[in-house]
Image (cartoon, coloured by chain):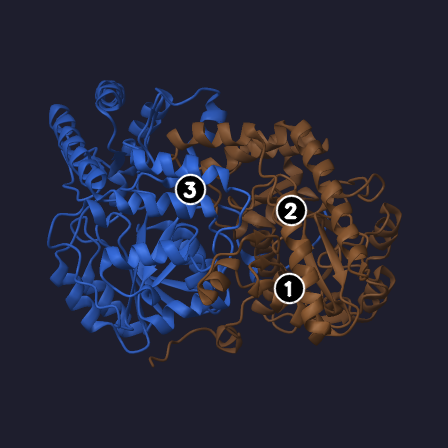
Chain colours: A brown, B blue
Amino acid sequence: MPEYRTSSLAKKLPSTVPFVGPEAQERAHERAFRVRIGANESVFGPSPQVKKAINTAAINAWKYGDPEFFDLRHAIAEHHKVAPEHIMVGEGIDGLFGYLARLFIEPGDKVVTSAGAYPTFNFHVAGYGGELALASYRDDHEDADALIELSQIHRPKLIYIANPDNPMGTWWPANTIEKMIEQVPDGSLLVLDEAYGEFAPDGVLPTIDPFDPCVLRFRTFSKAYGLAGIRVGYAIGEPTLIKEFNKIRNHFGVGSLAQAACVAALSDQAYLMQTVLDVAAARERLYQIALDNDIQSIPSATNFVALDCGRDGEFASTVLQHLIGNGIFVRMPGIAPLNRCIRVSVGEQKDLDQFAEALKGALKAVSG
Amino acid sequence: MPEYRTSSLAKKLPSTVPFVGPEAQERAHERAFRVRIGANESVFGPSPQVKKAINTAAINAWKYGDPEFFDLRHAIAEHHKVAPEHIMVGEGIDGLFGYLARLFIEPGDKVVTSAGAYPTFNFHVAGYGGELALASYRDDHEDADALIELSQIHRPKLIYIANPDNPMGTWWPANTIEKMIEQVPDGSLLVLDEAYGEFAPDGVLPTIDPFDPCVLRFRTFSKAYGLAGIRVGYAIGEPTLIKEFNKIRNHFGVGSLAQAACVAALSDQAYLMQTVLDVAAARERLYQIALDNDIQSIPSATNFVALDCGRDGEFASTVLQHLIGNGIFVRMPGIAPLNRCIRVSVGEQKDLDQFAEALKGALKAVSG
């Protein structure tokens, strides 16, 4: 095998990836999933206006996207009632996390997050040689106080929290996050991941202070807007910080088609509200499915629900394998005690009917 | 202005970008370009089959793209008659260059390229602290011998050459590149940028030796396939090297829609051949326009032609500004002596009619 003169950092990195796609599992099982409710995608899809915009944009697919995202940044800014210089667009929140890690992290730098929180953030931090200091979840919530305490010890460059949380679906009221922002140590930046923000009830998302240099917020078109297949996310923050991304990003990385789709998605807030209602109804159905099977569900402010299988990670993993073997794509948290749960994204009624039956079978099989 | 604890590398980076998009110029001039022939996009657009595929994929836009690009990698592999493990897909060649620089370059590492060659490659190298050693163009060609000589001195981690070249459109026969590959010093990697490869005549692209650890080749759907607006490129190379990208890339960065579009583009080789013919005809027209204006054109194997304005960079820049002021989007090389030229992408007949008239006016204005 040839030896390449890759960087000392690259040589140390594992080739493991944060998430294996459902397609890889389908290929391994030589069978397509009949229900795809594992990646917190929105089965309700994007607005019909987005589909129209994509069809129109297809005619212009030969043109590079505007590297400054003018129209999209303005639409996002208007939506959040901030000026466009507070907005950076990128190849999904994941892409922006990669850029953020690149901007801040040098080998040995500390980053604070929760054990079991979003692994792709950790992947990018580790990818630049950063070291994680981990707080534990408390009662299935990321522990805001513990994250701040740990930050006061480590003075990390970045502190991560998702509100609402993934993989548990739990949330904090805005004032908990606001208090956290106030307590961010000097020289630390709070990475506030609001990928599921559109699903949250009133009072969960803090008011945006677009000049606060202590916090950078992240949103996406992949979840509530139903556009995971075009990968666009954005950051909202203080303009000096926003501008830093220009030094390093893949300027033409978000194409014209994706930009047009996102502008259309933002313009149809009525559709978004309907999706949020559909998701809420499907979440209730998942709670009911848990009840019907005598297991607990964790109340969620997202488009998924963590179902507590009632024992340890090994048990939950067996349940998961049964579901997957039965054609149902779901995932589970990676770390105890969260991994006593499986994480089920909302689906359409027919998806959840099939899940309900498969779960019953799986629990029966593994308990018997 | 707040001070951020960004990395020592990030602090040193300029905020200049390789290319300002035409949209930014349109906003600055408060007027849309009437002819867009500056970014080497394909005005002939993608295949009708691609448009169909995009419309179909729009229905599934809620699904993340397969992070392993199974279908697309297999289609690319089949097209090039190699196995899929030789293929890596990314967010345009630019995105892959970013990953490549990240994998290899540490501060102070040397990279060899030509003065005036593709600036986005340099942007990514500099972004990881790499230092460029520059060979001069010779007779408007990247100088393969000089690049190798410089590489023998510096033993760089990466050596860049584009064949056919951008911004001059010139090319080398395959055996020049093959000889170059043979002479790559131990521990160096030749970055062979074939973004314009589909336009080249027979005998220009070397046969692919997919196990050669000395060369990594890059192709794109942005040029001949007419899909700049969805940003997908790929690398062809030795499998160990290809796998390295998995350690660091944005795994879900190329969405399901983009992947479906590229599979459809590859499947319509008849359309590609027609595009290549249309481009060749338009190139002839650009040569004729040069002749009509008593200026030289540089023979090109790409979808653009460098027109030699006959004096220095300042003169060419004035011609360029006239064209831009007259609603014609074109670009020019950044470095002498290449910058005696303007670089004009092929257009549809009506585009080139307008360009011909505008060029005549511009030359008259600046010469008079």
Q: Amino acid at mark 1?
A: Pro
Which callout, 3 or 2, points to the residue nearer the camera?
2
Which residue was labeled with disc 1?
A119
Give the residue displayed 13% in from the left and 32% down from the top: B284
Q: Amino acid at mark 3?
A: Ile
* Callout 3: chain: B
Q: Could you tell whether B125 is left or right of B45 in the image?
A: right
**Labels 3 and 2 touching (C-beta < 8 A):** no
Viewer-side residue, A128 vs A272: A272
Question: Badge 2: how crowded within 10 Å, few (<14), some, or many (20+)?
Answer: many
Label 1, secondary structure: give it: helix
Q: Is residue B29 above or below residue B248?
A: above
Question: Badge 3: how crowded within 10 Å, few (<14), some, or many (20+)?
Answer: many
Residue B241 at what x, y percent from top left?
37, 71
Give the residue displayed 30% in from the left and 51% down from the top: B117
**Labels 2 and 1 touching (C-beta < 8 A):** no
Which residue was labeled with disc 3?
B230
Viewer-side residue, A359 vs B325: A359
Q: Amino acid at mark 2?
A: Gly
| Residue B210 shows in the view | yes
Q: Could you tell whether B341 is left or right of A221 in the image?
A: left
Mark number displayed over residue A347 = 2
Q: Name which quarter of the figure residue A151 lies in.
A: bottom right
Q: CA distance from mark 3 to mark 2?
A: 28 Å
Residue B151 at what x, y percent from top left?
28, 70
Question: Badge 1: how crowded within 10 Å, few (<14), some, or many (20+)?
Answer: some
Dot placed on the residue nearer the N-terminal end, 2 or 1: 1
Q: Name which quarter of the figure residue A341 lies in.
A: bottom right
Mark number displayed over residue A301 = none
